[in-house]
Amino acid sequence: METSLPIPKVPRLYSFTRSFRFVHHPLDVLGQYVDNYGPTFQWYIAGMQKCILSTDPGFIQHVLQKNHRNYNKSPLQSEKLAHFLGQNLLTSNGSYWLRQRRLIQPGFHKQRLAGLFNIMQKVIDESLEELDRELEKSSEIDIFPQMMDMAFRIVARSLFSTNLAEAELQQLKYSITMLQEFLIRTIRQPYLAPWFKISGKQRFHEKINAKTDEVILNIIHRRQKSSKQPDDLLQMLLDARYEDTGEGMTDRQLISESAVLFTAGHETSANALTWTWYLLAQHPKAIQQLRAEISEVCGDAPVTFADLPQLPYCRQIIEESMRLYPPAWITDRTAIANDEYQGISIPAGTMIVPYIYGAHHDPAYWENPEAFQPERFAPEKRKQQVPFSYLPFGGGPRLCIGNNFAMMEMQLIIATMIRRYKLELVKDYPVEVEALVTLRPRYGVKLKMKKM
Ligand code: HEM
């Protein structure tokens, strides 16, 4: 029997007919639903999976923080994603997740991040030398693949530092990209599952996944045999000991946690950086203010770890960019037991979709929501923001474990590059949002760049 919820409902048939447009233009479809049905409504993903979607910060906070114990990651993450990635921080629930989180969290504390700063700086310098060579060939460049490559290398080196050969890095990049693309198709078009099996696509991707695991396991084994113990994330994972048993993680766990740091940690940052360049290229005054801030703090010297907190405007620019273009634009949970939020009944098993993009663009919480205004994130303004109206890194106990890592990486990249290059948008190049696992530019972002 259908449980009735006292909230607006998008009819199932309408959800199904809109699902074809939803595959390629989810933001349009969801934006229309929000306009027509309000901030919280019932809807069917692909016309099949019933869920409650909400842009209401109070509702989102209830699910992610206040009553988080009643909400697990939905089967999309805990089963579909886990099928490839295994059980790890991102895909697990309950006591297993808590144990992993407690074990791994210290590796992301600020003082540990200081150790990764030099690795990041080296990767950025190498990548920019490569970019300079590209720019000698043509001053017009798509900045998205550049940011993807830089962010991938940063995560790869932060994890495996010297133990990673270039061929392995390329293999991991290829596999992770392929697997992500396949996964999104299995989620968006679940009715294609039989076809994926018959056509061999499922098996093909299983093989890619096995190869990824093999590459990571080889790296782990090389490290275990090595006398050198670099200050990187793999060493942190290897050294971590469970409080209760005093034991470390198994190889299977190490593979799975490494793989998830790659997956969660590169495309998100690359998107945020690309959108930040897109916005900056249209706001020369913001560039001017940013350059002035950096030169006041750093002079002509390279940016250091200690400089980052002294660059608040740089941070505000990134925060505003992630408000307009949140890389993780949506997430999901499933209710374990019956629950209620302000008269809305939430039966056990209901899938909840906190719609992050919708919250970030809601005129009820953001004046002139489509405008780029980094000043919104000035400390005194930030205090006035409604909790959970801004959540690029999620919220509650499952807040992104890599948020400080990502902010450090992004600030360093933006501050380094904005002093090195003049930039403007290539005229008439189409820039369009594509909402896949992350919010990316469908055709990239073409910039005209010149070394200063
Ligand atoms: C701009 C960059 C990033 C954004 C916008 C972002 C966003 C998010 C969001 C929204 C969540 C919560 C998802 C949910 O509650 O359902 C999350 C979780 C997670 N992120 Fe990030 N992330 C970023 C960078 C990173 C980096 C650099 C790493 C690692 C190196 C990372 C690792 C993770 C992991 C492991 C989780 C799962 C945490 C848990 O459930 O305990 N992320 N991220």
Image: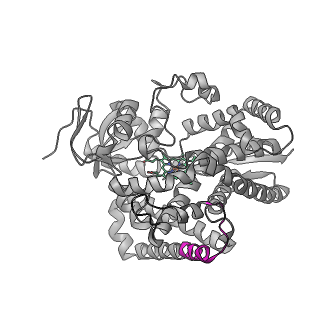
Q: Is residue 419 above or below residue 192?
A: above
| Magenta segment | 215-232
Identify the residue at image location x=51%, y=61%. Answer: 240
Identify the residue at image location x=42%, y=48%. Answer: 21
Q: Where, by quadrant of the figure, is residue 218 drawn?
A: bottom right
In the depicted view, which residue is nearer to us: 262 or 9?
Answer: 262
* Residue 173 place in picture, x, y as percent: 60, 66
Q: Main secondary structure of the magenta part?
A: helix
- Is residue 367 visible in the rendered structure shown here? yes
Identify the residue at image location x=64%, y=29%. Answer: 374
Identify the residue at image location x=37%, y=47%. Answer: 332
Q: Is residue 86 above or below residue 435?
A: below
* Residue 83 place in picture, x, y as percent: 39, 66
- Is 279 displayed left or right of 200 in the figure? right
- Is 141 displayed left or right of 91 in the figure? right
- Is 39 displayed left or right of 108 in the figure? left
Is 273 contained in the magenta span? no
In the depicted view, which residue is nearer to us: 208 or 400?
Answer: 400
Is 220 contained in the magenta span? yes
- Is residue 44 visible in the rendered structure shown here? no
In the depicted view, which residue is nearer to us: 122 or 360?
Answer: 122
